Image (spheres, grey):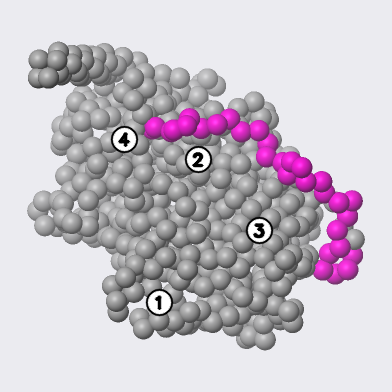
Amino acid sequence: MKIRRRPVSVALALLGLVVAGVAAWSWVASRDRMSIPSAPALSVRVLAKPGHPVVFTSRTEATSLQPEAPETEPYREPVLIPWAAREGRLRLLDGDGRLFELTWGRRLADGSTLIDVMSPSVSLDGRRVLFAGRSGARDRWRIYEIGVDGSGLRRLTGGPDDPGCVAVPPLRFRADASKLSDQERRKLDYDDVDPTDLGPNGFAFASSRLPDLGRDQSRRATQIWTWRPGEPTPEPVTANRNNDRWPILLASEQILFSLWSRNREAVTADLTEVRPIAQGGDFATRPTDQWMAAIVMTNAAQFGYAIKSVEPVWRPRPLFNGRIAFMTAPRPGAPLRLAQADWGYIRTSPSSFAAGETLPDEGGARLDLGPNRDSEGRELTTACPSAAPDHSVLFAGAPVNAGPASFALYRVADDWTTTTPVPERIFDDPALVDAEPVAVYARHFNPEPRPLSRILADGYHPPESVTLASGAKYAGPMGYLENVALSAAIRNPIPWHDRSGGKQVDPRVNPLVAPPPNVKAIAVYSANRDRFDDPDQLRIIGTWEKQAVVPVINEDDLMAWVPSHPLNPSVLVGLDDQGKIARWLGVSSTTRPPRTYFAYAGDHYSGVRTNGYHYCNGCHTGHTFTVLDPTERTAPWSKSRP
């Protein structure tokens, strides 16, 4: 037997050497294919060879660490550009420690050059870098791409054929008091940032193309958009009235992103309605103001949460260890920290809690803060995490209370639960803020992302009209809503342990949050966006309307056509048999006291696309949880390099 096995083992060993040799040859060959020269003057700033290429930004200000759009006076030129820096460069540090300037001084097709860049990401095949860029001090953000070898720099959005905003954006007055025309503003007055590759489905990005300043503030809202190849316009797949940021495609074909849940509506104390708190009165719940990690299908058919923690969740990214990394602030005003959490971690959902109550248990899931001391023991501000193929996390860091230019690139092992690894600094340009590092590798998708057609409610035929809550007939554009699990427990895989007996409880039998037993109808509210199309009134504040009330079928199902318009995002509310907001008391145990919950999905706004199909799970805290494996994966080596 040994004699028979030896040739096989020798052959396998030789094959391994051949594969390793070819891979090594491919790496050596590909690293010398850069179409631009390296920047040897910066080689002294390279403190460690990363072993794999890393793209990152070096900027004069640390604005890429700011999640929300800034408050701004939106009507006078020049307009404050959100997240802008005076100067920004996209750079590549190769595995051997050579540094390349990918964008600085490079000419675009129109002869201009990029003065600022932000939020790079690498394409699924590892060959291209997508990023946001600006070519002038007053220019807004647009999406660009460039090959990892420095070739093919080009603009993807904001070209002559790009229609720009969906509606008329805020009025703009020049220095001489003349007004920019509606068409000029549609074409110019928006920002596209945070791109991510979707393979055959194009790319996704955050954008302010749905003009809106949000309720009780003056920040331009951003949503997640997708732009498919061959389509003349992009489409929004989320509907926030605040800020959605930093999308990334998961291997499950879901888009993971940061959502600023800042809905200003709450359940009234008498449970008769949901209304904006600015209208005054007493309320049974509190409005939301938190950042969470959310997911949306690439065809926008389903939305869900990924991580709802008390701490903010900014720039979530999948890791090779199966967890989600993000940057956060453990408490208001504290230095930024890295964190990891299990998929589905939930500790808060304020729209559906009674005022002052919180979720009593996280269901066995973990949230761990990352290392924040360097090799010299100095406390670090840490931000912008992303995965690297060697089971490490790349991030930006600086000594606490140091100036912005102290931000440098670091890496650290991704195991923070059993050890406390020490971060290693790999690059530092002392004149600029080095941040947003992303490793260059091909990402594995099995199966490969499927090309998408426009997802319509196939087999579902809209009625000629529907009756609105006001009693009026509506015959305009409509979208389809479906939920066949209103009273079912969330399909939550997080183990919950009965600490009194140490036993693991099936969450489908004893869920973290019990589903409502008393929802008899669903009210559909619309949180209408601001309007800027009045010649005399600069801003018409968006209204809040109850559009429809739909009875629940067979005590568990929602199936309804409702009005559809991108300027009127929706919120769903469950009603009891008295027509009031459904309220119930959760289950209790020796370690888990009961809590009061409301059937109000007010942690986010939902878009209803014309003829689109939309599905949600549940009508309670943690609604629309999706079971999936978010583990980051590399593609075979043959696909990972040009």
Report the amino acid beneath label 3: Asn
In primary-sequence order, the first of circles 1 and 2 is 2
Q: Secondary structure at mark 4?
A: strand
For the residues labelled 3 and 2, say whether their Cβ atoms are less than 8 Å apart.
Answer: no
User: Residue 70: horizontal and vertical position, in percent?
Assistant: 50, 57
Q: Is residue 538 left or right of residue 621?
A: right
> In the image, which residues are magenta?
443-472
| Closer to the eye: label 1 or 3 | 3
Q: Secondary structure at mark 3?
A: strand
For label 2, the residue is 253
Residue 321 position (above or below residue 602): above
Report the amino acid beneath label 1: Pro
| Closer to the eye: label 2 or 4 | 2
User: Residue 573: horizontal and vertical position, in percent?
Assistant: 66, 69
Between residues 495 and 92, which one lies in front from this camera angle? 495
Majority secondary structure of magenta residues? loop
Res 360 label: 1
* Mark 2 to mark 4 CA distance (whole Å): 20 Å
Report the amino acid beneath label 4: Ala
* Crowding at mark 1 (Cα within 10 Å: few <14, some 14-19, many 20+): some
For label 3, the residue is 483
Res 478 label: none
In primary-sequence order, the first of circles 1 and 3 is 1
In primary-sequence order, the first of circles 4 and 1 is 1
